[in-house]
Image: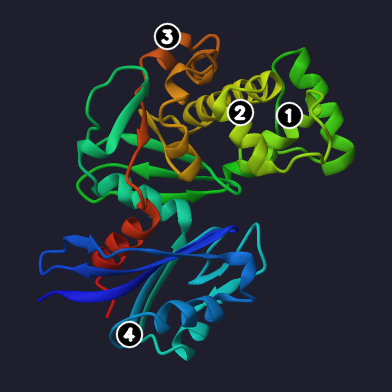
Amino acid sequence: MSRTIAVADIGGTHARFALATIGATGEVSLAAERVLRTPQHPDFASAWREFAQGLDAAPPDAIAMAFAGPVEEERGRLTNGRWTVDRASLNDLGFRATLILNDFAAVAVAVSALGPRWFEPLSGPSAPRAAHELTTVLGPGTGLGSALLVGGAEPHVIPAEAGHIGFAPVDAEEDRLLMQLRPQLGRVTVEHLASGPGLARIYRALGGADGAIDDREIWELALSGTDERASRALARWCAILGGIAGDLALAQGADAVVIAGGLGLRLRDHLPRSPFAPRFAAKPPFEQRMRAMPVRLLVHPQPGLYGAAVAFARSKAT
């Protein structure tokens, strides 16, 4: 017997909602999503009510949520936002069954469940993902999410907070970047650079007009290739992301890496020809190992929603 649940993917910028149908054997299908702006709502309840009012029928009594922040005992707090959620607050909204997990834990669950057509090679060999792989899952957005997927007959996901690792420069330009950012940010983390807002920080550190254009415009300039400084900033951004991905893979003993998230998908055509791959592999004395490691881009449009639904199905929540 199939079951319909609500699914949500909550980040610091966007709150995504959809209905998901879980089939009798655990297969998941998603209905069309609705995207709301997180900062325009004081809390999750407000955003949920807006979504629920647009449904054609009564909302489901079960929800699975991917939440961009640490989640402990089904209580989450946004790392880059004000919202908090917990089981009690969801019960107050009428949910009898709930599941809250870190957003990149949900993405890693999606990685474990999706077929080969949802992955494209970024660097290394282009072999299909093996079920037993130990996979570092990483993705830039408002912040920098991460998780570790332990493959096997029953895949296991370990949420991580890799975005808060300290940034380590590798050349003189990055030394200057760190020195410019430290007075503003204190401890400079990898999330400060390899994220959506990170491109603007790099651009301005390279001499871009301070405050003259906003973050969105800088991304548009960088992707269009019409502004030399923005293009340089994007090349540096991609290199930094590649370096972080390689560092994590080494630290976690990974067999493979998956890059996910909205920005990764937006850079689908750009990342393979960027400095991402050379920087990923530049890990002496492990260059040969890094060049032989598959790095894949996840191209599913909503892995957080899908992964949350799969996690709910696997949890046998009632």
Is any part of residue 194 visible from this angle? Answer: no
Where is mark 3, residue-wise?
288
Residue 152 sits in quarter: top left
Circle 1: element type? helix
What number is the disc on residue 222?
2
Q: Earlier in the sequence, mark 3 or mark 1?
A: 1
The answer to whether the residue labelled 3 contacts the one labelled 1, judged by CB atoms less than 8 Å apart, is no
Residue reaching furthest front? Answer: 226
Frontmost residue, 198 versus 313: 198
Q: Earlier in the sequence, mark 1 or mark 2?
A: 1
The answer to whether the residue labelled 1 contacts the one labelled 2, judged by CB atoms less than 8 Å apart, is yes
Q: Amino acid at mark 3?
A: Gln
Q: Earlier in the sequence, mark 4 or mark 3?
A: 4
Q: Amino acid at mark 4?
A: Asp
Residue depth check, mark 4 versus mark 3: number of the one nearer the observer = 4
Q: Position of residue 182 (x, y in %)?
A: 85, 35
Q: Amino acid at mark 2?
A: Ala
Pointer 2: residues within 10 angstroms few (<14), some, or many (20+)?
many
Where is mark 4, residue-wise?
61
Where is mark 1, residue-wise?
203
In the image, taking residue 114 as reference, residue 136 lies left or right, namely right
Q: How many marks?
A: 4
Q: Amino acid at mark 1?
A: Tyr
Q: Earlier in the sequence, mark 3 or mark 2?
A: 2
In the image, taking residue 77 as reference, residue 154 lies left or right, namely left
Frontmost residue, 12 versus 189: 12
Mark 4 vs mark 2, CA separation in Å? 44 Å
Residue sitting at 70 percent across and 40 percent down? 192
Q: Position of residue 238 (x, y in %)?
A: 56, 25
Residue 128 sits in quarter: top left
Residue depth check, mark 3 versus mark 2: number of the one nearer the observer = 2
Residue sitting at 9 percent across and 76 percent down? 1
